[in-house]
């Protein structure tokens, strides 16, 4: 019985830590230079899945076209943005995002649908 208990306690601790990280935190890897100099290519990030509000300037992790991306919010719902010489208003529950490395970032400026929906946001990065 003692040997089983010695094994069960570490397994329970590992399971508890996994559950906490799955529900509260996001650990990721930055594969491109699109967020340099803020986030260097190849660095790891820890973000929180629980946040109160998102605002201009926040760095977020989100899903876009089947990939996970990290970008900075440049405009929030109701803001006006210029894309390709045309003026758009950011829709409700949406964000316009840009990489900090403007010359090396595939972001809202280039997407067919330039806005990130709030439901596609996974976490907020705290720098």
Image (spheres, grey):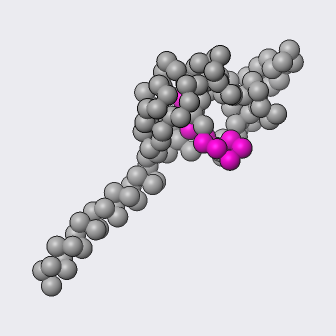
The residue drawn where x is 53% and y is 34% is 31
Magenta residue span: 59-68
Q: Residue 20 placed where, x, y %?
A: 39, 55
Q: Compared to 44, does 25 lie above or below? A: below
Q: Residue 11 placed where, x, y %?
A: 28, 68
Residue extending furthest bottom?
Answer: 1
Q: Residue 39 placed where, x, y %?
A: 48, 25
In which quadrant of the rendered view does residue 81 lie?
top right
Q: Is residue 67 visible?
A: yes
- Let me know if residue 62 is in the magenta part: yes
Q: Compared to 26, does 72 lie above or below? A: above
Q: How many marks?
A: 0
The residue drawn where x is 46% and y is 45% is 26
In which quadrant of the rendered view does residue 77 lie?
top right
The residue drawn where x is 68% and y is 31% is 95
Instruction: Locate the N terminus by quadrant.
Output: bottom left
Query: Which sits in the foreground, 47 or 65?
Result: 65
Q: Is residue 77 visible?
A: no
In which quadrant of the rendered view does residue 65 lie?
top right
The residue drawn where x is 69% and y is 28% is 107
Q: Residue 25 placed where, x, y %?
A: 43, 46
Query: Which sits in the foreground, 45 or 20?
Result: 45
């Amino acid at each position: 019985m003692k040997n089983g208990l010695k094994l069960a306690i570490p397994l329970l601790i590992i399971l508890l830590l996994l559950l906490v990280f799955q529900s509260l935190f996001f650990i990721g890897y930055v594969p491109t230079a699109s967020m340099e100099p803020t986030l260097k290519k190849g660095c790891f990030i820890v973000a929180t899945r629980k946040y109160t509000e998102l605002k201009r300037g926040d760095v977020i992790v989100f899903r876009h076209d089947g990939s996970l991306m990290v970008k900075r919010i440049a405009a929030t719902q109701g803001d006006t943005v210029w894309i390709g010489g045309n003026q758009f208003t950011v829709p409700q529950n949406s964000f316009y995002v840009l990489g900090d490395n403007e010359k090396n970032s595939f972001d809202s400026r280039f997407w067919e649908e330039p806005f990130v929906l709030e439901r596609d946001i996974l976490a907020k990065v705290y720098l």
